[in-house]
Amino acid sequence: ARPDALPRDLEGVHVAVSAGGTREPLDPVRYLGNRSSGRQGWALARVAAQRGARVTLVAAHTADLVTPAGVDVRRVGSALELRDAMHAVAATADVVVMAAAVADFRPVDLVEHKIKKTDRDPDPVALTRNPDILAELVAARRPGQVVVGFAAETGDASTSVLEYGRAKLKRKGCDWLVVNAVGDGRAFEVEDNAGWLLSADGAETPIPHGSKARLASAVWDAVAPSVER
Ligand code: CTP
Ligand code: CA
């Protein structure tokens, strides 16, 4: 849709969105990363700004994306940096969206100098769990603040994408969970749906297959009326 055709239903609302994939440092030149492009978080930020929100975008590593007009971008690297940035912005945000692909694990040690190869086999890399930032943001939620999480699920023989989504919504305690069906089973299992938008009050809205901008619009259509102002 043309920006001037969009509703201005996020006027006066401060939205914080995380996007992209975190990079967990191993030494000064190496990291553990993931393939997230950041495009979905970018679309959520861009559409929110077009609908009148003040938007802060906390960006981990992304593809080479153009900063959306009128959006304040803060760059972070690791999950721990993303955590600090999200807690800082969540202190004033009305809506918090965790679209980032946060690494579940990070190397225990950040080696100070570049690891050198020797004649011996390398040591294994010891990993530790990263904090669950979404769960922390839910625990720190201010009255009236709306928290939105994302989940990409494949489903398996015993459990469908939707069932995994429902369980994750409960476990995380967020107000909304955007469940994306991914992987090979997608077409068979979800027909023309790219996923669902699950609400903590039990509402389940199918999201039709479409662009990331369309998905972003569907999310804001549902979330905007629930924002107190
Ligand atoms: N998330 C987070 N902090 C983490 C891991 C995930 O805030 N350490 C957020 C993601 O940004 C997303 C949601 O939690 O909004 C769900 O992420 P997902 O990876 O699907 O869930 P996990 O709890 O990590 O479970 P699993 O990967 O085992 O499915
Ligand atoms: Ca995970």
Image: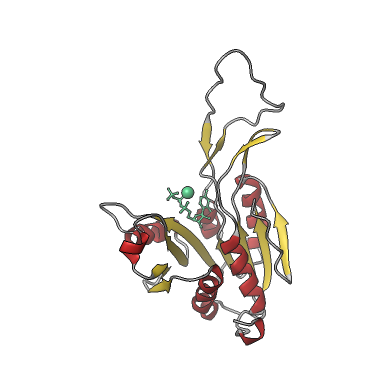
Q: Quadrant of residue 208?
A: bottom left
Is residue 194 depicted above or below 125 in this figure?
below
User: Where residue 38 sits in the image (x, y, percent)?
Assistant: 60, 58
Is residue 155 depicted above or below 118 in this figure?
below
Residue at 34% over, 57% down? 185
Q: Is residue 142 left or right of residue 200?
A: right
Residue 173 appearing in the image: yes
Residue at 31% over, 62% down? 188
Quadrant containing the N terminus in the rendered view: bottom right
Q: Nearer the viewer, residue 215 or 225?
A: 215
Quadrant containing the C terminus in the rendered view: bottom right
Q: Nearer the viewer, residue 203 or 64?
A: 64
Residue at 52% over, 74% down? 214
User: Where residue 39 sits in the image (x, y, percent)?
Assistant: 59, 61
Q: Quadrant of residue 48?
A: bottom right
User: Where residue 55 sits in the image (x, y, percent)?
Assistant: 67, 69
Residue 199 appearing in the image: no
User: Where residue 127 sits in the image (x, y, percent)?
Assistant: 52, 33
Is residue 20 depicted above or below 92 in this figure?
above
The single residue placed furthest to the left in the displayed view is 158
